[in-house]
Amino acid sequence: MSNLDRQATLSVCGGRGFVVAEPVRELLTPRHVRLGESTEVRRLLPNLGRRMVGAWAFVDHYGPDDIADEPGMQVPPHPHMGLQTVSWLHEGEVLHRDSLGSLETIRPRELGLMTSGRAISHSEESPRPHAALLHGAQLWVALPDAHRAVEPHFQHHTDLPTVTAPGLAATVILGALDGATSPGTAYTPIVGADLALSRGAEARLPLDPDFEYAVLSMSGEAEVDGVPVLPGSMLYLGCGRTELPLRAESEAGLMLLGGEPFEEEIVMWWNFVARTQDDITQAREDWMNGDRFGTVRGYDGAPLPAPALPAVPLKPRGRVR
């Protein structure tokens, strides 16, 4: 999924400057962003004061939207570099096309994982015809410096491992949780899991104290470590936890995101993750005037033009490692 903000800002993320080394309960309020003609997303990362959670650098939650008589998701071809996109659905379908020639329909509880590496472009759209409801999350994972120029590739996994406890089923989307490991390729110590809680469930989920964590509420009424988390909001939890208490007032869907704090400082702008502003400037030029990102074939529409770069140079938060 693209960041469609036409006035995208440069920002420095990562590093340990904002990592909280102890357990906290920091509720993040989303920013509402239009995505296409009929989809509005709630953007949780990057957020004011909280740019990343482990290597997770971007989180959008959307729906459930009634798109029975609407075009649904329509995101034209656009570029990515230096990151992985994670597509995760609770309802509906998304048709993925990319410049490698991939063409896949992603359905609920299936992992669509695109590793952009040095450069890729893709589009996302609701199929025609499509289901009446659309509900899901789109997330980005920053690639560490050693792998940020890896060859681009796309993975579609329909069979993912689960961890169960009374009242809880956790599907491991990326990384590992309680001994279960996703088949999706990960480049840093990380975890992403979909948590399905039954009404009245009380559970304790094992965590790694070296990871920082956050929980995104997808649906229902749930408490995370005693804090009510409403759908479309996210609770940042810091580090130092060995378990996470969960309680559900109704059937509820959550996403657990975590990982080792991302050591490197990165520069994010539009749909790019880089290390310097010069990298960003070159990537924008290559998208607008070159063939570095390839061509998405089969999408009915023109590629997205890049927004203008800000006139004021980026002021780094600290030394970019």
Image (tube, rainbow, N blue to C red):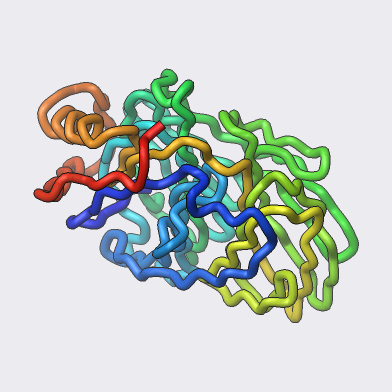
Q: Position of residue 272 (x, y in %)?
A: 31, 39
Image vertical order of residue 263 relative to residue 187, above or below: below
Who is closer to the viewer here, 17 or 103?
17
Q: Is residue 26 left or right of residue 246?
A: left
Q: Position of residue 81 (x, y in %)?
A: 34, 32
Image vertical order of residue 247 relative to residue 98, above or below: below
Instruction: Please identify the quarter of the rendering in which residue 156 is found.
Output: top right
Q: Is residue 255 visible?
A: no
Q: Residue, x 56% and y 45% (percent of image)?
A: 54
Q: Quadrant of the C terminus?
A: top left
Identify the residue at the far front of this view: 318
Identify the residue at the far top of this view: 151
Q: Residue, x 31% and y 51% (percent of image)?
A: 3
Q: Residue, x 77% and y 51% (percent of image)?
A: 207
Q: Is residue 270 left or right of residue 229?
A: left
**Number of marks drawn:** 0
